[in-house]
Each structure stands twice: as structure tokens, then as C-alpha cells.
Image: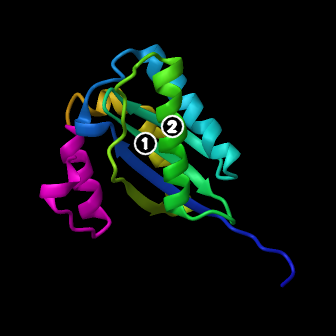
């Protein structure tokens, strides 16, 4: 086959360092989400949606055929952290070092898009820690509570 075709949907979740609520301002959060989508696009991994609340983000993207997941996440964190410090004037902003990345079937994209779009409402009922525990359990991943909450 002469043509390479890839369609891999990935749900990425990561938090601010120590879950510090740096992103309480909804306009700052909106701008950051747009910036993260731009980084994904530049990495040839277009974001379908970026959302989250004051202490974490969710990205749903199509992973490009020339990039691995750890490189994509490293680039989104590095570039957005520098941007937040300079453009949003939050000099002590950092992302946690870890992340969650989950493969999504095309049949679940619409449901996950709705879920990410409604993060503010969702987190009135469930904390980030409980959400992340639930996601890891759903995908059969064990977490070590000593390290996951950096």
C-alpha cells in the first residue's frame, strides 16, 4: 500500500502542578484552550475540542501519523506553559509532569466531545481526582496514589 492513513482519537488529561487553580478566570481558560488547540494543529494532531476547569484540561485530538503521544503532550505542556507565563501573566504556572492518555473509538467521539464541553457542570458533582480515578479504572489502568497527584 503506497498511502499511509491514520485515524487515532486520543483523550488527553493533565492537571496544573499540585492542581493549583490558576485558570479560575473563564476568559483566560478560553484563551488557553484555543492556544492548546493551535499547538495540536501545529503538531499535525488536530484537536476536536479542548476543555477543562481551573486546575486541569481535557484534549480530544486525532493523533498525527508522524508523532507519538509523549511528544505531543510534551509540546502542548511546554509551549502552553511558556505562553501562560508571558501572555496571561501567571509567572509561577506549571503543569504536572504526568498525564493520562486514552484511546477513543470513533463511535464515542460525539459523547466525549459533549463531556469535555460540559466540564464546568461536571465538576460541580465530581472532583478532578475522582474523575481521573474513574477514567483510569474505565480503561483498566492502575494508578499509584503516591505519585499521580503531583
Disc 2 residue crowd, few under 14, some 14–19, many 20+, Cα 10 Å: many
Q: Residue at x 53, y 44 (%)?
A: 76
The mark nearer the N terminus, 1 or 2, is: 2
Q: Is residue 143 magenta?
A: yes
Identify the element where label 1 is drawn: strand
Label 1 with label 2: CB-CB less than 8 Å: yes
Q: Residue at x 54, y 22 (%)?
A: 31
| Residue that mark 1 sits on | 58
Q: Position of residue 61 (x, y in %)?
A: 57, 50
Quarter-of-image position of residue 18:
top left
Q: Position of residue 45 (x, y in %)?
A: 64, 52
User: Which secondary structure type mostly characterizes the magenta part of the structure?
Assistant: helix
Q: In the picture provided, is 91 more to the left or to the right than 74?
A: left
Q: Position of residue 121 (x, y in %)?
A: 31, 27
Magenta extent? 127-150
| Residue that mark 2 sits on | 50
Please determine whether, in this image, residue 109 is positioned above or below residue 83. below
Q: As rendered, which of 55 and 78 lies closer to the eye? A: 78
Q: In the picture provided, is 11 more to the left or to the right than 133?
A: right
Disc 1 residue crowd, few under 14, some 14–19, many 20+, Cα 10 Å: many
Amino acid at each position: 500500500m503506497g498511502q499511509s492513513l491514520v485515524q487515532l482519537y486520543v483523550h488527553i488529561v493533565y492537571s496544573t502542578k499540585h492542581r493549583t487553580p490558576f485558570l479560575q478566570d473563564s476568559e483566560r481558560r478560553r484563551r488557553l484552550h484555543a492556544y492548546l488547540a493551535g499547538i495540536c494543529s501545529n503538531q499535525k494532531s488536530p484537536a476536536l475540542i479542548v476543555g477543562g476547569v481551573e486546575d486541569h484540561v481535557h484534549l480530544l485530538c486525532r493523533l498525527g501519523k508522524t508523532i507519538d503521544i509523549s511528544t505531543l503532550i510534551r509540546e502542548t505542556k511546554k509551549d502552553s506553559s511558556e505562553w501562560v507565563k508571558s501572555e496571561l501573566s501567571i509567572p509561577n504556572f506549571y503543569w504536572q509532569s504526568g498525564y493520562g492518555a486514552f484511546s477513543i473509538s470513533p463511535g464515542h467521539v460525539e459523547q466525549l466531545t459533549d463531556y469535555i464541553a460540559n466540564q464546568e457542570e461536571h465538576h460541580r458533582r465530581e472532583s478532578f481526582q475522582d474523575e481521573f480515578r474513574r477514567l483510569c479504572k474505565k480503561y483498566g489502568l492502575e494508578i499509584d496514589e503516591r505519585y499521580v497527584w503531583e
